[in-house]
Image: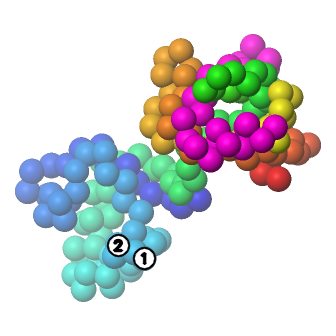
Amino acid sequence: MKKGHLIKSVDPGSIAEEMELEPGDVLLTIDGDEIEDIFDYEYSYFIGKEAAGQIISYVQKHSTETMSSTSLPTISGTVTEIGNGYIMVDDTVLCKKSKAGKKYKVYTDDIKIRRWIESGELKEGDLVIVEYEGEISSNYEVKGAYSIFTGTLEENGILNQE
């Protein structure tokens, strides 16, 4: 995980505007190098300590510290049903409180996923990790699944890919 700063606002005429930062941007790196302190700004842009200090000050005032991850969107849980063109995945096993669990209908439009299910290797009761593109609908339907892995549940409640 990388630390970053979520830009909440950009004042007209500010250094942030000159750098073409916009609200919603997350500042993680400069030209691919992680930003740790004022010297990273000063060195990367050859702008001097004073200007670098202004940037740091501005970002600290107008941002919220965030954590960034390169992980892909996933859902995990137990396969409770294998239907025609979908599987049902219940994540209750991963929740501390069973009432917090959700049941997802994952559409299996991807040919590799369909073939794997048709082979009989995926069974009801299997723990799975589903990678997908797109959004989960308000009724917990997942479209755009492109990868499913079986997994094992570790003692710490984390589902790891087999």
Q: CA distance from mark 1 to mark 2?
A: 5 Å
What residue is rendered at 68% in x and 43% in y? 115
The extreme right residue here reads 155
Disc 1, SS: strand
Residue at the spot of label 2: 30
| Image quarter hosting the N terminus | bottom right
What number is the disc on residue 54? none
The reply to whether residue 116 is in sight is yes
Residue 10 x, y percent position in the rendering: 19, 49
Answer whether residue 119 is magenta in the image: yes
| Image position of 88 (left or right of 107) | right
Report the span colored magenta: 97-120
Residue 26 x, y percent position in the rendering: 37, 54
Residue at the spot of label 1: 33
Judge by depth and name the residue closer to the eye, 107 or 62. Answer: 107
Disc 2, SS: strand
What residue is rendered at 55% in x and 22% in y? 141
Confirm or deny contact between disc 1 and disc 2 (CB under 8 A): yes
Residue 139 x, y percent position in the rendering: 53, 15
What residue is rendered at 31% in x and 60% in y? 57
Residue 15 x, y percent position in the rendering: 17, 63
The local crowd at label 2, few if under 14, some if 14 to 19, many if 20 or more residues have their Cα within 10 Å, is few
Please identify the quarter of the rendering in which residue 13 is found: bottom left
The extreme left residue here reads 13
Judge by depth and name the residue closer to the eye, 107 or 55. Answer: 107
Please identify the quarter of the rendering in which residue 91 is found: top right
Answer whether residue 75 is magenta in the image: no
What residue is rendered at 73% in x and 24% in y? 82
Amino acid carrying label 1: it is Asp
| Image position of 55 (left or right of 37) | left
Judge by depth and name the residue closer to the eye, 39 or 75. Answer: 75
Rendered view: 151 above or below 101: below
